[in-house]
């Protein structure tokens, strides 16, 4: 009975991520196809090419990225955001999500994100985190005024995380993208890579 339970759990763990991914893709494709049919039917009638919804969705996201990159549209978007940035509870949720998304977006002129290993001197402990701030300039009084960086330490399964301010010498960059680190943290680093551990860099 114990072996049967183990096999069942292994099968469930294998099928669950794949099933959820396929289901979410199915929902997105179904929604985009229905929307595309409503948009193009007045122009093409009953003629329709399957997959047009996905193509229009990708094109729409691309065009939106082009538009919001323009200064005028960016200012107009800031006016649209006013209701979301002034309602007390909505403001906290919207601002947090927007700041999180902005951190991972490829803005020009913004320092590139860096994945680091945090080591506390004298402790055989390694924590993987993301540099989110390269200094303490602009922070309120009360922080230790020396060469420190802010490191975000994501928790497994994305249930939260901690931001710690540590001396710059405590962190060591590793050759890993932010996306890879966040994906590994999502599943508590249970996945294994065949190419061995990532190489390290020399500076932050």
Image (cartoon, rainbow, N blue to C red):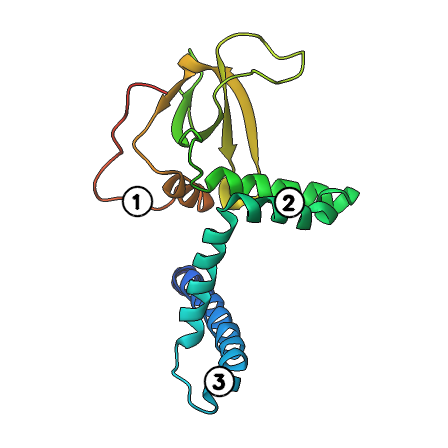
Q: Which residue is mark 2?
A: 78
Determine the residue located farthest toward the front in the rendered image.
72
Viewport quadrant of the N terminus:
bottom left
Q: Name the foreground residue: 176 vs 85.
A: 85
When asked about the image quadrant of residue 118, the answer is top left
The answer to whether marks 3 and 2 mark residues whose Cβ atoms lie closer than 8 Å is: no
Q: Name the foreground residue: 47 vs 19.
A: 47
Q: Residue at x 51, y 30 (%)?
A: 152
Q: Which residue is mark 1?
A: 192
The answer for how far apart the CA atoms under marks 3 and 1 are is 51 Å
The answer for how far apart the CA atoms under marks 1 and 2 are is 43 Å
Q: Name the foreground residue: 109 vs 111.
A: 109
Q: Residue at x 68, y 47 (%)?
A: 79
Q: Which residue is mark 3?
A: 43
Determine the residue located farthest toward the right in the rendered image.
88
Q: Earlier in the sequence, mark 3 or mark 2?
A: 3
Within 10 Å of disc 3 (Cα), the crowding (few <14, some 14-19, many 20+) is few
Residue 34 at what x, y percent from top left?
Answer: 52, 79
Q: Residue at x 46, y 92 (%)?
A: 46
Residue 106's place in the image compared with 120, above or below, is below
Q: Earlier in the sequence, mark 3 or mark 1?
A: 3
């Amino acid at each position: 009975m114990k072996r049967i339970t183990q096999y069942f759990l292994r099968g469930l763990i294998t099928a669950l991520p794949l099933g959820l991914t396929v289901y979410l893709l199915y929902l997105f494709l179904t929604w985009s196809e229905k929307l595309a049919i409503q948009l193009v039917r007045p122009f093409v009638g009953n003629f329709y090419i399957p997959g047009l919804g996905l193509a229009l969705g990708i094109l729409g996201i691309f065009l939106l990225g082009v538009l919001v990159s323009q200064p005028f549209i960016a200012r107009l978007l800031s006016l649209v955001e006013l209701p979301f940035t002034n309602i007390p509870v909505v403001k906290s949720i919207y601002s947090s999500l927007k700041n999180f998304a902005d951190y991972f977006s490829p803005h020009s002129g913004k320092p590139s994100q860096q994945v680091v290993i945090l080591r506390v001197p004298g402790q055989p402990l390694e924590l993987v985190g993301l540099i989110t701030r390269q200094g303490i300039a602009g922070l309120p009084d009360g922080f230790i005024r020396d060469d420190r960086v802010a490191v975000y330490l994501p928790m497994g399964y994305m249930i939260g995380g901690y931001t710690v301010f540590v001396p710059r010498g405590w962190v060591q960059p590793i050759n890993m993208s932010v996306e890879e680190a966040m994906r590994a943290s999502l599943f508590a680093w249970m996945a294994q890579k065949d190419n061995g551990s990532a190489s390290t860099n020399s500076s932050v």
